[in-house]
Image (cartoon, rainbow, N blue to C red):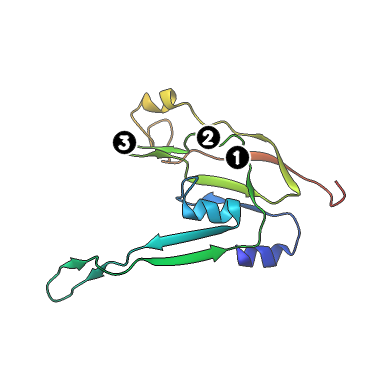
Amino acid sequence: LNRAAAFAAGRPLIVCGDLNSMPGSDCYNLYSQKAATHTYTPVCNNEVTGEIATDADAVTTSYAQPLNLRPAYDPLPDFTTLTDDFRGMLDHIFLTPRVCALAHLDMFSEETILEEKSLPSSRYPSDHMACMALLQVTSPEQ
């Protein structure tokens, strides 16, 4: 995101993709709130015994990015993927302030997807639904 901000140099920017991150996750928060703090416990594999040790101290790392991003979808869809064992929103479109979403593609209903159990299916060949938005870039004065 730092490189994208440098590239855009204050111009309108659209950031989108399969982030494999749910709203509320550290990654999503980095995009939507400009910062995230992630705490984890390192796991070490003993190459001699094969045992996995998790007795290390927790590590906290903070991340920040300069872009003021907001989601193109408002409200957020309940999911962009629905499989046998997972249901969530992993695909995102983020906009900087001078880009506004005039409309967006609705997601399939859960009932429609469940007609064939989950995604992918014979009707929908991907495990992710398409995210699409009609966008308008406004002038700096607006």
Q: Does residue 99 appear left or right of residue 126 in this picture?
A: right
103 or 29: nearer the eye? 29
Q: Is residue 4 above or below residue 80?
A: below
The residue beneath circle 1 is: 132
Q: Earlier in the sequence, mark 3 or mark 2?
A: 2
Indicate left or right for 81 with 101 as reference. left
What residue type is disc 2 on?
Answer: Pro
Mark 3 residue crowding within 10 angstroms, few (<14) / some (14–19) / many (20+): few
Q: Residue furthest right?
A: 141
Q: Are marks 3 and 1 in contact (CB under 8 Å)?
A: no
Secondary structure of the residue carrying tag 3 is loop
Question: Which of the two discs, 3 and 1, labels the residue nearer the N terminus?
Answer: 3
The percent position of residue 6, horizontal first and vertical second, equals: 68, 67
Q: Quadrant of residue 103?
A: top right
Q: How many marks?
A: 3
- In the picture as drawn, the residue positioned furthest to the bottom comes out as 48
Taking the spot 61% from the left edge, 38% from the top edge, the residue there is: 73
What is the x, y in percent for residue 42? 31, 67
Identify which amino acid the numbered label 1 is placed on: Met
Q: Nearer the viewer, mark 1 or mark 2?
A: 2
| Towards the viewer: 72 or 39 | 39
Residue 98, position in %: x, y?
A: 76, 49
Determine which residue is flagged by label 2.
77
The structure residue drawn at horizontal position 35% and vertical position 27%, both measured from the top left corner, is 116
In the shown orientation, is residue 7 left or right of residue 141?
A: left
Residues tagged 1 and 2 counted as in contact (Cβ below 8 A): no
Up-down relation of residue 109 to residue 14 (above or below) = above
Q: Is residue 54 left or right of residue 3?
A: left
Query: What kind of residue is marked 3?
Result: Asp
To which residue does mark 3 refer?
84
* Cα distance between the residues tagged 3 and 2: 19 Å
